[in-house]
Image (tube, helix red, strand yellow):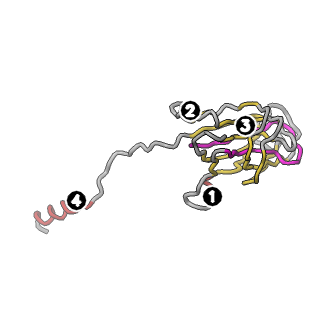
Amino acid sequence: MRPRVLALLLALLLLAAPATTAPQFTPSVPTYNVFVASIAAANKDHLTVFNAAGSGVLLRVHRVAVGTVNTAAVVGAMIYFNVDKVTTAGTTCTAVTIRPYDSGNAALPAQVTSTANCTTDPTSAWTWSSCSISTEETLTQPGGQTQVCYESQRAPDANPQPIILREGEGLGLKQTALAGAGTVGLWITFGR
């Protein structure tokens, strides 16, 4: 081939090639997490996130998990948990601190709360999912055992919708009627 034809072909290839650019930073959605260590007990509402009226925000739940956090030998058993939609917050509860993934995240409105160990449990409307763990120390690995109860990315759809908590709605982790032993850790991760 002639040098002029080769130069023309090279020029056309360069024009057709996609431009390379440096990776662009894509800001993520502000994400928050709540965690509590709680003693296993039948029918216990261990952890709730509630979006009360007047918050002006929608909460998108990304992940709910439970795990063992035993600090001593325990002869445990299987413990079952329900991930419930709740329509009222509990009363006389222990406040649980909501932590941002990024310290630069905007503060949540005061109407968005997380609680544990309520005297009067939140009102459950229905159960989204459930999961179980064993607190038996001989069955758990060093550092404990963790079970994901809900995760929006695990849904069969390629781009699933997360659980949405509108004003007046919440999500709670409640142990079922089976008793258990030991200490469990419970996590709820959500964004705005």
| Sooner in the amino-acid sequence: mark 3 or mark 2 | 2
Q: Residues within 10 Å of mark 3 (few under 14, many from 20)?
A: few
| Sooner in the amino-acid sequence: mark 3 or mark 1 | 3
Q: CA distance from mark 4 to mark 1?
A: 41 Å
Q: Position of residue 32 (x, y in %)?
A: 60, 38
Indicate the secondary structure of the residue bearing disc 3: loop
Magenta segment, principal secondary structure? strand
* Viewer-side label of 3, 1: 1
Identity of the amino acid at label 3? Gly
| Sooner in the amino-acid sequence: mark 4 or mark 1 | 4
Q: Are marks 3 and 1 in contact (CB under 8 Å)?
A: no
Q: Which residues are magenta?
A: 168-192
Kindly identify the residue that appears in the image at 52 percent across and 43 percent down.
Answer: 29
Above or below, 12 relative to 33: below
Q: Residues within 10 Å of mark 4 (few under 14, many from 20)?
A: few
Kindly identify the residue that appears in the image at 63 percent across and 47 percent down.
Answer: 166
- Check disc 4 and report the residue beneath it: 15
Q: Nearer the viewer, residue 188 or 9?
A: 188
The reply to whether the magenta stretch includes residue 189 is yes
Kindly identify the residue that appears in the image at 61 percent across and 52 percent down.
Answer: 162
- Check disc 1 and report the residue beneath it: 155
- Check disc 3 and report the residue beneath it: 143
Q: CA distance from mark 4 to mark 3?
A: 55 Å
* Viewer-side label of 4, 3: 4
* Viewer-side label of 3, 2: 2
What numbered label is drawn on residue 107? 2
The answer to which image quadrant residue 182 occupies is top right
Q: CA distance from mark 2 to mark 4?
A: 48 Å
Q: CA distance from mark 1 to mark 2?
A: 29 Å
Indicate the secondary structure of the residue bearing disc 4: helix
Indicate the secondary structure of the residue bearing disc 2: loop
